[in-house]
Amino acid sequence: MISILLATVDTSVESEQVQEFAIVQDSEDESRNQSGRRDGRVTSRSSRLVSSCCHSAVMTSPTSAGPPGGYQRFDDDTSAVAQDVSYGSSPKYGSMLSCHSSDGRVRMSSSRNMETPNEMSHRIGIGGYDADAVTENVAIARHSAVIDADMHWEMNYHEASIFLEEGRNNEKFDSHPRHPEDLPAYLLVHNSWYYGLDLLTSFVLLALAFVEEPAVPLFRLPVWTHGSIELLALIIIGIELALKLRWIGWGTILKHKRTMLKCITLAIMFVEAMTVLARQSSHFRVTRALRPIFLVDTKYCGGVRRFIRQILQTLPPILDMLGLLLFFISTYMVLGYYMFSEMNRNFVTLQDSFVSLFVLLTTANFPDVMMPSYSTNKWYAIYFVSYLCTMLYVMMNLMLAVVNETFTSAERDKFKKLLLHKRKACQHAFKLLVSKQNPDKMRFRQFEGLMRYYVPNKSTRDVILMFRYMNSSGSGALNVDEFVNVYDATTLQWELQYSSIPWYHAAWQPLQILCTAAHAAIIWPYFESIVCATIIGNAVAMLVRLIQPFDSLQESAHAFAACWDTLLFGGIFVSEALIKVLGLGTRRYLSSGWNLFDLGASISTLIAAFGLTIFPNAAFLVLFRPLRLLRLFKIKKRYRDVFGTLVILSPLMCSTAIVMLVLYYFFAIIGMELFAGYDMRNCCQNTTVEDFYKYSANGSTSLGYYYLNTFDNLMASGMTLFELTVVNNWFIVMNAYAFTVGLYTRAYFMTFYLVTMIVLTIVVSSFLEAFRFRIQYKRSTSKRDEEKMLHEEVELRWDELQSIVQDFQLLEQLRSTLVVGGTTTFIGSRPRTREVLQRRMYTHEIYEWLAEAEIEEKRSGSGPIGSFDEIGADDGAIASDHIVLNGGPLSQQNSSVTTSPM
């Protein structure tokens, strides 16, 4: 009935309603700008999107469901929406989350074919209907269309931010949500609160090993308690996988090896947890060793996953070298068996020969394994010397060289793939942020809408500066080649460029005088020399305290770390930090890593002095006073390179530490299942390790105490595994359990050694590659070039800004930070990360990679970026809907962005 009434409206009423529609739009835009841009929050916006998405999904008829792919074009022109509301097709979402409207939506005919109102009314029999009611219905319909159009853009902003996040996290695009009903589940799983819950659940699962049998009696919990906790944790993880399955589907999950492994592990562990609860007793559960899979799969362990992926990529050459090592060990095994089986008990059988030579590869049993043969004939030493020279000094170093070369190539390929993956993510996002009139240009409003979801903590000023930095052409709109720099732009921290105005220029007058004096002291050429001399004086004082005799260790420790000279030098160092804070400002002072280290070491020294005075037995507090001496190593360039490499390697070292802990957890669980409950005291009578396990109530022998190396709980297992990692006398622990439990257990210890050797070899290779990379970078980059690389300069002209932003409320907010009618210069600083250095070192390679990618895109037929068509999308399903944007076309301005060359 409403559609029939709307068809009776004449063209004069249409013109009035277009004006009413524009007024409603301005009111809506003003309220949205005040609420959305001032506080920068997107929570309510996200809730609106989810609700709208779900509502649209309900309204969609099954027969009208469109394809999962396809990008939607929207109009820039204000009049286009009025036209569309009157005559156009029903709008739909303009993203890959698009849902098609049902046929029951309001549609109107073109005015060119419309009959007069009286003729139409007479024909359909509504001649006496009130025209005011018709006018009100038209206004409501148009107002609703504006809200829908705005919601469509918000959907595009949100989906574009999802693409950028997938590119940043190196996630595959086949897990991208394709339908609007998938968005609530996707947003729930990709929520910071859910990330925290997932991480907490993973930690709870890992911590259960402390309370399950075998465990320390203090921590042990009943079976029903830890079984219920495990079941609850597995249910939470299962809910996450179910939500993923909602938008990914089984077909995609089967292609994701990590997700499939997680599903299989979850199913097995769920069945086992139910079995434990039903039986009220545990059983042989080596599957508990797979619990770290859930931790590695969390959002916060992306670096760990990348490091594990590099390990797997480096495995083929390692396995090749291990095969060669096995050949030489087997050859020497046969030779040693026939030469020494009658005179050396380490070679009595072929198995003993293999184990002895395997241990000899780690030098843990040398020269003990040689001495029986050496005592018979001195020439037998040639056998052992040749074996060690061949295996230890040639083959092992050759394996390190092969692994290093493979790791270097893998590191380069990883950077290339991540770069191209981010580029593809930017292309996907760009298609969602352009309009019908400008299919190759992204305006500021679209960019600002994207940033509200991608980096909601950025201020409006920072968003404008990022836009100007990326718009190197100065056209006032971003093309796709400029937009691919969005990842780099979001890392920049912007500050006003002050040539000579210090931070305290507007402070209280006495404070200005104090800060001016502090700044003069800092720039004094001899200031750093005085600081170094003070540090040397502190070192001399510590040396005097060390050689000074005392009656007890407590007195010596107090004199070393809590006497008057400690307080004196600690106070001087804190005063130095205060002077730098006053002269440089808090932000500039804390931006330096060395300043942070100096401040932390100085405060820790004073705290340790007071702590040692109160607790004389806390001898570990003497550690903090010598820390300040590290500042002296900064003087020499080689030490600076070492410290710089450590800073760059810090993320990798964290990932390596987590991988090692995961390995320890894995082998500790298996070790507890195999060896828990065995009493190792006096366990190895009449064996080669008998003396190491002798025990008596009055005390063990000097070789004893090895009986403490057990697998009775998680902490004891971890300590035993660390001793095996060091490989000093590790064969004693292996042989003790082999004689007590069974000879087959040697496979457990040998496997642990090989796995840790592989991981540590890759870690050494990563250190070598990082140090070599930094040295090459330093040689090819001057200090000036590095400063240009880490800083970008952007000039904002007020008149040009008005033509770009075209938002009165937004411009009013910027008046306090910009020069109205003039030019304001900002400096953007990016962190010195490994990725930034790689972009500098691989500049020429990046051009080649991008050229290859463009050729491959043309060859695969993906088409230009502005085609709005995703590969495999149904072009016929893409309609031409329209949306209202604030303002008219952007004026073409000359660029005022000055960027430093890479």
Image: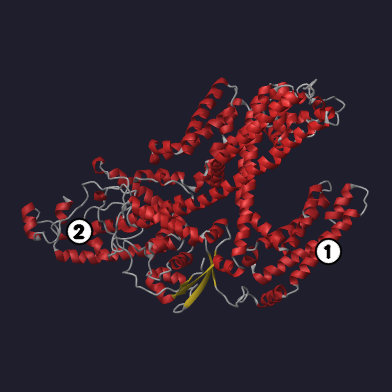
Which amino acid does the dot numbered 1 rest on?
Gly
Q: Dot 2 corresponds to which residue?
A: 86
Residue 739 in the image: above or below residue 836: above
Which amino acid does the dot numbered 2 rest on?
Ser
Camera sees residue 40: no
Q: How many marks?
A: 2
| Residue at x 63%, y 32% (from the top left corner) | 327
Kind of element beneath mark 2: helix
Give the foreground label among 1 and 2: 1
- Mark sitting on residue 537: 1
Left or right? Give the position of 683 relative to 794. right
Left or right? Give the position of 33 relative to 100. right
Camera sees residue 771: yes
| Residue at x 64%, y 51% (from the top left corner) | 768
Front residue of this view, candidates 663 and 435: 663
The numbered mark, 1 or 2, whose residue comes first in the sequence reads 2
Residue 381 locus on image (x, y percent): 79, 33
Residue 279 locus on image (x, y percent): 56, 20
